[in-house]
Image: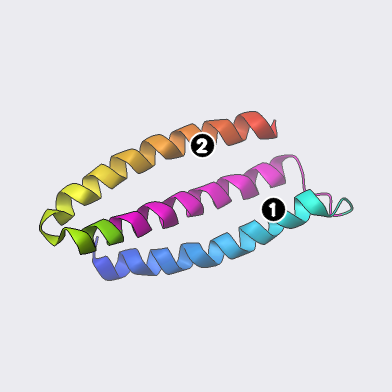
């Protein structure tokens, strides 16, 4: 994927994090809002997905700036670490929400 497309996704996930993070904070701190159950689980999964992509892409960009000759290897290593961490976090979220 082109670097410009990756950065557009990076910016889009920042907006998604603002929206889903706000919903998460409201659901946990305002008792009358009533966002729980499947809707809350869906929000958390979207939040975690956006957070993982945003964080892993940020780390990837920083590492590529530091070691530009190894950009392909860095991208694959970050991808593997990200997928493993994402699967673990999703299973944890599903367990905690249910």
Q: Label 1: which residue?
A: 24
Q: Residue at x 21, y 50 (%)?
A: 74
* Membership of 56 in magenta stretch: yes
Q: Label 2, on which residue?
A: 89
Horizontal arrangement in the rendering, residue 18 relative to residue 28 (left or right): left
- N-terminal of the pair, mark 2 or mark 1, is 1
Left or right of 5 in this view: 95 = right
Determine whether the residue tagged by mark 2 lies in a helix, strand or loop: helix
Majority secondary structure of magenta residues: helix
* Residue shown at 47% from the left, 32% from the top: 88
Identify whether 33 is placed above or below 5.
Answer: above
The extreme right residue here reads: 32
Q: Residue at x 33, y 39 (%)?
A: 81
**Spatial CA span between label 2 and label 1:** 16 Å
- Along the line of sight, the residue nearer the viewer: 81 or 91: 81
Q: Which residues are magenta?
A: 33-60
Q: Position of residue 46 (x, y in %)?
A: 56, 50
Q: Is residue 97 above or below residue 8?
A: above
Q: Secondary structure at mark 1?
A: helix
Query: Residue 32 at what x, y percent from top left?
Result: 89, 53
Image quadrant occupied by the N terminus: bottom left
Q: In terms of image quadrants, where is residue 38?
A: top right
What colouring method underlies this structural image?
rainbow
Judge from the rendering whether residue 78 lies leftward or rightward of residue 20; answer left or right.
left
On screen, 25 above or below 95? below
Task: Provide residue 53's location: percent of width, then percent of height.
Answer: 42, 53
Quadrant of the rendering where the C terminus is positioned: top right
Instruction: Please name whichever residue, 42 or 60, is drawn nearer the observer in this view of the structure.
Output: 60
């Amino acid at each position: 994927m082109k670097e410009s497309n990756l950065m557009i996704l990076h910016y889009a996930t920042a907006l998604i994090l603002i929206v889903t993070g706000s919903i998460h904070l409201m659901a946990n701190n305002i008792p009358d809002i009533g966002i729980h159950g499947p809707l809350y689980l869906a929000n958390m999964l979207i939040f975690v997905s956006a957070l993982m992509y945003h964080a892993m892409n940020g780390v990837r960009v920083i590492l590529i700036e530091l070691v530009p000759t190894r950009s392909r290897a860095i991208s694959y290593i970050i991808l593997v670490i990200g997928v493993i961490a994402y699967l673990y976090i999703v299973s944890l979220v599903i367990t905690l929400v249910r």
